[in-house]
Amino acid sequence: MGGIGSGRRYQGGRDTTNDYRALDVRWLLRNGLLTPGRTGTTSWSRNGNTIASIQVRAEADRVILNYRSRSHGDDWQAMEYPVYLEWTECHLGGRRAWFRCPAKGCGRRVAILYGGAIFACRHCHRLAYESQREAGHDRMARRADRLRDKLGWEPGILNGNGVKPKGMHWRTFERLKAEHDALVGESLAGMAKRFGLLDRFMD
């Protein structure tokens, strides 16, 4: 388990949530690992090889995390500490579990903790979301691709528009198409500006 500084720092920016190993309380709940008395192990792999693992032991109102950690090639250190849980009622019945961030002075209610020397929330690790790295035109292209998926069109904004999906109302289709085309236009304009294409045409 790498230390807090083990993520790949983005040049000129912050590490992102994708650079750190994530422990999701929803995954633990789905797999029965929040039931008091249960002990389980979750691991992370890369190219089919396990690169890190953590043991989780559930108690009445908390889980105990047990793993080894080291930073910058230092000796391995055994880590064991509690992460308290909070439960909230869902509107349609049932309960939802949350972690209370164990970092000193925090205690935020979060669904995901990120592993460094300790598992803590993204605020404590000062992590950005991966999407925050994206340039504006990349975000527009990603949003347009989500609309293409909804419309059943081939992925990729350079592939041109498809046809109206069978069973979709024309009004809905025209609305989604107009939104898609606007996003594509903004994305292409942003790419042209980034690569200096507009300047070439204006010279």
Image (cartoon, rainbow, N blue to C red):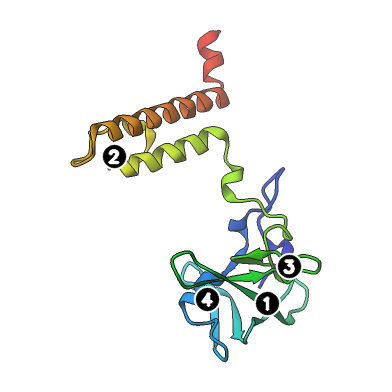
What residue is rendered at 64% in x and 75% in y?
85
Q: Amino acid at mark 2?
A: Trp
Q: Amino acid at mark 1?
A: Tyr
Q: Residue 177 vs residue 66: left or right?
A: left
Say whether disc 1 or disc 4 marks the residue closer to the N-terminus.
Answer: 4
Q: In the rendering, which numbered label is found on residue 108?
A: none
Cα–Cα gap, marks 3 and 2: 44 Å
Say whether disc 1 or disc 2 marks the residue closer to the N-terminus.
Answer: 1
Cα–Cα gap, marks 2 and 4: 36 Å
* Disc 4 target residue: 28
| Element at label 3 | loop
Q: Quadrant of the C terminus?
A: top right
Q: Amino acid at mark 3?
A: Gly
Q: Is residue 77 above or below residue 44?
A: below
Q: Residues within 10 Å of mark 2 (few under 14, many from 20)?
A: some
Q: Residue 56 vs residue 125: left or right?
A: left
Question: Circles 2 and 4: CB distance less than 8 Å?
Answer: no
Question: Residue 164's image quarter?
Answer: top left
Say whether disc 3 or disc 4 marks the residue closer to the N-terminus.
Answer: 4
126, 75: nearer the viewer: 126
What residue is rendered at 62% in x and 86% in y?
60
